[in-house]
Amino acid sequence: MKTKSFASLAAVLLCVAGAAAVAPAQAADGKPDPAPTDDPTVDPDDPGPAPENPEPLPDQVEVPKPGEVTVSSYVDDLPKPPEVTDTARRAGAIGTICLNAHLQGIGWQGWRCQPTGRVDSVGTTGQSRRMEALAVVTYGVGGVCAIAHVQGIGWQGWACGGNAQVIAVGTTGLSLRMEALGIGTYNAGLCARAHVATLGWLGWMCVPPGFAGFVGTTGQSRRMEALDAVLQ
């Protein structure tokens, strides 16, 4: 009798354990926990909507004078400058701006160049892909300065170069997102805008010659994904 009772009890316990194994997990309030998702469109780094009072970017500031700054680059293997026409090379001719973005999972995207008045675009949209670094070279506008705000680093410091001299800001090989950018040229006005995570394209920023303007966000853990820039 005792053996039969113990066998019956074991069978009951086995059934209970099996039911618990297949029952949905219960939260403290008795409701089932949500099932995990494998949706590839979900961005694990999504910072969500912009805060009501976002951290302000710096106002437009005067770019450092040529030769005034010497910044150690955080960028390895600086891309070679693109080939441009003799017209674009001549000082005083219509200026040209060339951009090259270093992107998550891609590396250097390749140089894109546009003359004054035409929008130059780098980066990606709709791919949840961070910009990690930006290389810039200008022709016919006296040179360019840029400064980047980078994940875990903050504002890096200015990088400036003259005509046909490549500068780069951001990082490579560290998997860090660029979050904001300041950029300006010596002898031409410039307009720029940034595409950032979950917010899309932000508004245009325009500055006169000799000044840098700022695009992107700070204090929101939000990656830059693309950049538009146009010489004026």
Image (tube, helix red, strand yellow):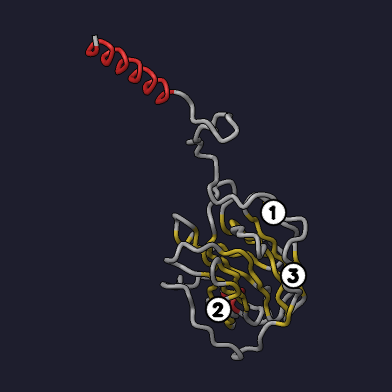
In the rendered structure, which amino acid carries the disc numbered 2? Ala
Foreground: disc 1 or disc 2:
1
Q: CA distance from mark 1 to mark 2?
A: 29 Å
Tag of residue 3: none
Q: Position of residue 5 (x, y in %)?
A: 28, 12
Foreground: disc 3 or disc 1:
1
Residue visible at 58% across and 29% down in the picture? 31
Most extreme residue toward the front is 1
Tell which circle, 3 or 1, labels the residue nearer the N-terminal end: 1
Q: Is residue 133 left or right of residue 92?
A: left
Identify the image quadrant of the C terminus. bottom right
Residue visible at 37% across and 21% down in the picture? 18
Residue visible at 30% across and 18% down in the picture? 10
- Position of residue 105 relative to residue 170, above or below, is above
Residue at image mark 3? 232
Residue at image mark 2? 164
**Could you tell me which secondary element the residue under label 3 belongs to?**
loop
Q: Is residue 38 left or right of residue 198?
A: left
In the rendered structure, which amino acid carries the disc numbered 3? Gln
Residue at image mark 1? 201
- Position of residue 31 relative to residue 96, above or below, is above
Which picture quadrant has residue 8?
top left
Residue nearer the viewer, 82 or 158: 158
In the rendered structure, which amino acid carries the disc numbered 1? Trp
Q: Position of residue 169 (x, y in %)?
A: 54, 73
Identify the image quadrant of the N terminus. top left
Q: Residues within 10 Å of mark 1 (few under 14, many from 20)?
A: some
Tell which circle, 1 or 2, labels the residue nearer the N-terminal end: 2
Most extreme residue toward the left is 3
Q: CA distance from mark 2 to mark 3?
A: 18 Å
